[in-house]
Structure formats: structure tokens, C-alpha cells
């Protein structure tokens, strides 16, 4: 395929991903914020993002098998249509339930609406599992392996513009204006992403001749990961890190409201500032990895997470917190570039969907645990301390966990990447 054609294919793929991540970014604020408008119970507030992340634990393995059986472009299109429907239903449910009742400290005054939104969030989460696994497996078919760092950096930078820069700011503004409108807008955005993917040309169905049996197919993926020690290590580290990260992400919702006294727009702008750091990380990741080497880059970015988790509750205001999140997202993008680019190179195309799904089951399956754990920590801590201090405890626990993760993973990361480079 000519360079110009490759560039056009990648641009369309990146644009479609940018559209879906714009919708995801809007939803970052909207799902959690509307949960806080229906209940002040930290566990119930955490349930909404849990519904988005739980499918990674339940459907990651089936998604891998299906991704290696079908045309990955068509699978992406189908899942984006499903998400458009789910967001459209959520908009209708909220619109018909207006005005919202005053949220109680325990439980919710609108259980039917809360349950309906949970169901929509679960549907969105299921579609995301299949869509993201197919997209990550599809990228190596669009660009050569020696350009994966650059392509991934570009892809994640565009995704962050939508997911964490424009999306949260737009979502925060819209939910403060008309509560149901962000859900309706997301439905439209996913439809636009579908049209972009329709224009992508190529053969994105893996070449496979062996008989299909899901147990055999899954076993092949598990055997590959079992025999790849560095991939296993990266999956375990990513899973532990995601658990800690989700504790912090959901903890910020109530912390920003109650301890810093900020509203939805302030919260969205803080997340947007974090995205700026991530965007810079995406554009600079290739240079950082070449300068430091993949092993040292992974080591130091893991350590940076612990420092960021400590700094979050020490930030005296929203501006300082925004700077902390910007630095944190920068390091996170460098880590992702090291981890995902290595994975895309190391796994054969015909196994990429299955091994990716097993990897992401380990990595993303921990997210719901982190979300629930954050709410449990706050609830338990309130019995021994003030609510203001209790809202800080998820960050403290995450910082301790990240520090331990850094110590345990430091030498294995260095040894693993040293063996690969030899």
C-alpha cells in the first residue's frame, strides 16, 4: 500500500476514534455526575462507572475470539451503532424523568431512573469491550510495525483531545445547562463515527484456515501469553495500575465537589487540563522511549504514578490539581506507548484479538474492583474520621499501592526489556 494511501487510511481511522472518544469524554463527566445528582452515597455513585467497566471482566475473552473471526472494521461499526442506541435511550429516560428529585445521603429517590441508566451504561460498556479490542487489533494492519509508536502516539493524542480535553469540558457545560442533552449529543457523535468507518478500505479479517472452536481458539491465545513472560508482566502491572487509577478517578468526583467546592464545569476543566498533559505525552512518547529506552521509560512512569497520587490531595485548589493531573497523564501516555506498541509487535495478527482480550481481561478487569473499593474506603473511613478526610483516603491508598507496585516491578521490567532487545 502506498505511503499516501496508508496516511489516508490512518487519518480516517484516527478521526473515527477521535469522534468516539469525544463521546466517551462527554460521558466521563455525565455518567458519574448524574449518579451524584441521584444519590450522595459514594458506593451508589461508583456503581455507574462500575457498569461501564464490569463488561471488561465479563466479555473480554469472548470479544477476543470474535475479533479474530470476523472483519474487525464491521465489528467496530456494529458496536458504535449499539452505543448510539444506548445513549439515545439514556437521553429519553432522563428527559422523561425531569425534574430530578433531591438526592438522599443513602439510596436514591429515583430508583427506576437509576436502574435504567445503569442498564444503558452496561450496554455502552459491553459495546466498548468489543469495539476497543477490534480497534487495537486492527491498527497493525493499517501501519507498518516500525511506525507503531508514532501511530499509537498520534492515535492516543487525538483520543485524549476528545476523551479528556474537549469531551469533559463539553459534558460539564451541557449537563449544567440541560441534563439530558449530553446523552443525545453522544448518540449523534457515534453515528458520525460510523460513517467515518464505512469509508475505510481494506481487508481486516484475519487469515485463518484451522477449524473454529472457541475453547481451542481461547487456549491458543492463553498459551501464547503464558509463554511470553514480558507480556504477562505488562498485563499484571497494567491491571494493578488500573485498579489504583480507577480508585482515584471516581474519588475525584465527590472530592472536587465537597473538599474543593467546585461544580461540574470546574471538574470538567480539571480533567481537561489532565488531557493537555496526556496530549503532550502522546506527541512526545516516541522521543521519550527512544531517549530512555522502553524498560527505563516503563520503570520511571510507574514511579511517577505514585508521586501523582500523593500530590492530588496536597493540591490546595483546582488549578494546582489540574497541574498534577497534567503531569500524571503525560507519564501515563508514555507508559501506554511502551506497553501497547510492544504488544502489537509481539503478537501474530491471527492471534492478536485473543491475546489482546486475555491481556485486557487482566488489565481492565481490575477497574470495577478499583471503582467499588474507592466507595467502600470512603464509607468505612467515615466511621473513624470526618467526611472531608475520608474523601482523601482513596488517594492515600492508591499512592501506597503505586509505590509498592513500583518496587515489585522495577527489576523485572528492566530484565524483561533487556532480554527482548538482545
Image (cartoon, rainbow, N blue to C red):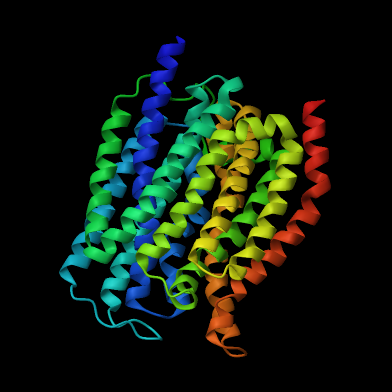
> In the rendered view, does 187 fall on the left or right side of 201?
left
Determine the residue positioned at 55% across, 43% down: 357
Horizontal side, residue 334 vs residue 177: left or right: right
Side (left or right) of 211 relative to 338? left
The correct choice, above or below, for 283 with respect to 362 in the image is above
Q: Residue at x 18, y 66 (%)?
A: 95
Front position in the image: 413 or 60: 413
Residue lying at the far left of the rendered structure: 96
Quadrant of the drawing holding the C terminus: top right
Q: Residue 243, image x and y in percent?
A: 60, 60
- Of the pair 10 and 218, the residue shown nearer to us: 10
Vertical relation: 248 (above or below) 85: below
The percent coordinates of residue 271 (x first, y second) are 46, 56
Q: Quadrant of the N terminus?
A: top left
Would residue 303 be found to the left or right of residue 95 on screen? Answer: right
Q: Is residue 331 visible to the viewer in this orientation of the structure?
A: yes
Query: Residue 163, how many percent across, how many down?
Result: 42, 48
Q: Report the front residue among 308 and 400.
A: 308
Query: Where is residue 406, by image quadrant?
Result: bottom right
Q: Residue 178 appears at what percent x and percent y?
A: 21, 64
**Visible in this render: residue 1?**
no
Which residue appears at 27% of the width and 48% of the height? 84
Q: Quadrant of residue 320?
A: bottom right
Residue at the outermost top position: 2
State the residue at coordinates (64%, 43%).
335
Q: Is residue 309 above or below residue 134?
A: below
So how many labels did they put on this image? 0
Amino acid at each position: 500500500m502506498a505511503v499516501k494511501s496508508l496516511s489516508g487510511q490512518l487519518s480516517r481511522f484516527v478521526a473515527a476514534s477521535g469522534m468516539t472518544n469525544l463521546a466517551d469524554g462527554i460521558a466521563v463527566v455525565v455518567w458519574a455526575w448524574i449518579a451524584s445528582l441521584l444519590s450522595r452515597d459514594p458506593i451508589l455513585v461508583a456503581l455507574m462507572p462500575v457498569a461501564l467497566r464490569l463488561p471488561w471482566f465479563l466479555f473480554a475473552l469472548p470479544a477476543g475470539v470474535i475479533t479474530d473471526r470476523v472483519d474487525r472494521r464491521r465489528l467496530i461499526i456494529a458496536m458504535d451503532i449499539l452505543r448510539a442506541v444506548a445513549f439515545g435511550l439514556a437521553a429519553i429516560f432522563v428527559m422523561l424523568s425531569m425534574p430530578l428529585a433531591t438526592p438522599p445521603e443513602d439510596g436514591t429517590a429515583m430508583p427506576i431512573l437509576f436502574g435504567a441508566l445503569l442498564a444503558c451504561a452496561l450496554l455502552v460498556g459491553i459495546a466498548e469491550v468489543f469495539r476497543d479490542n477490534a480497534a487495537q487489533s486492527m491498527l497493525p494492519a493499517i501501519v507498518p510495525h516500525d511506525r507503531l509508536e508514532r501511530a499509537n502516539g498520534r492515535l492516543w493524542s487525538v483520543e485524549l483531545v476528545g476523551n479528556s480535553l474537549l469531551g469533559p469540558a463539553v459534558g460539564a457545560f451541557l449537563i449544567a445547562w440541560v441534563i439530558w442533552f449530553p446523552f443525545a449529543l453522544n448518540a449523534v457523535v457515534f453515528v458520525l463515527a460510523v460513517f467515518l468507518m464505512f469509508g475505510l478500505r481494506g481487508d481486516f479479517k484475519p487469515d485463518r484456515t484451522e477449524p473454529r472452536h472457541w475453547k481451542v481458539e481461547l487456549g491458543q491465545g492463553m498459551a501464547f501469553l503464558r509463554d511470553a513472560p514480558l507480556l504477562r508482566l505488562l498485563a499484571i502491572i497494567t491491571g494493578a495500575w488500573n485498579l489504583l487509577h480507577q480508585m482515584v478517578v471516581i474519588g475525584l468526583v465527590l472530592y472536587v465537589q465537597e473538599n474543593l467546592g467546585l461544580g461540574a464545569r470546574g471538574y470538567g476543566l480539571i480533567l481537561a487540563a489532565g488531557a493537555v498533559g496526556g496530549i503532550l505525552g502522546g506527541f512526545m512518547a516516541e522521543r521519550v522511549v527512544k531517549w530512555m529506552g522502553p524498560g527505563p521509560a516503563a520503570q520511571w512512569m510507574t514511579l511517577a504514578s505514585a508521586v501523582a497520587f500523593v500530590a492530588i490531595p496536597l493540591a490546595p485548589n483546582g488549578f494546582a490539581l489540574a497541574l498534577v493531573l497534567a503531569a500524571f497523564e503525560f507519564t501515563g501516555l508514555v507508559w501506554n506507548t511502551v506497553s501497547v506498541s510492544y504488544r502489537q509487535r509481539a503478537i501474530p495478527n491471527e492471534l492478536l484479538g485473543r491475546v489482546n482480550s486475555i491481556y485486557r481481561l487482566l488489565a481492565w478487569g481490575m477497574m470495577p474492583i478499583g471503582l467499588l473499593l474507592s466507595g467502600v474506603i470512603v464509607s468505612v473511613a467515615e466511621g473513624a474520621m470526618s467526611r472531608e478526610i475520608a474523601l482523601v483516603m482513596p488517594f492515600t491508598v492508591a499512592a501506597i499501592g503505586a509505590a509498592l507496585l513500583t518496587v515489585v516491578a522495577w527489576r523485572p521490567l528492566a530484565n524483561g526489556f533487556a532480554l527482548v532487545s538482545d
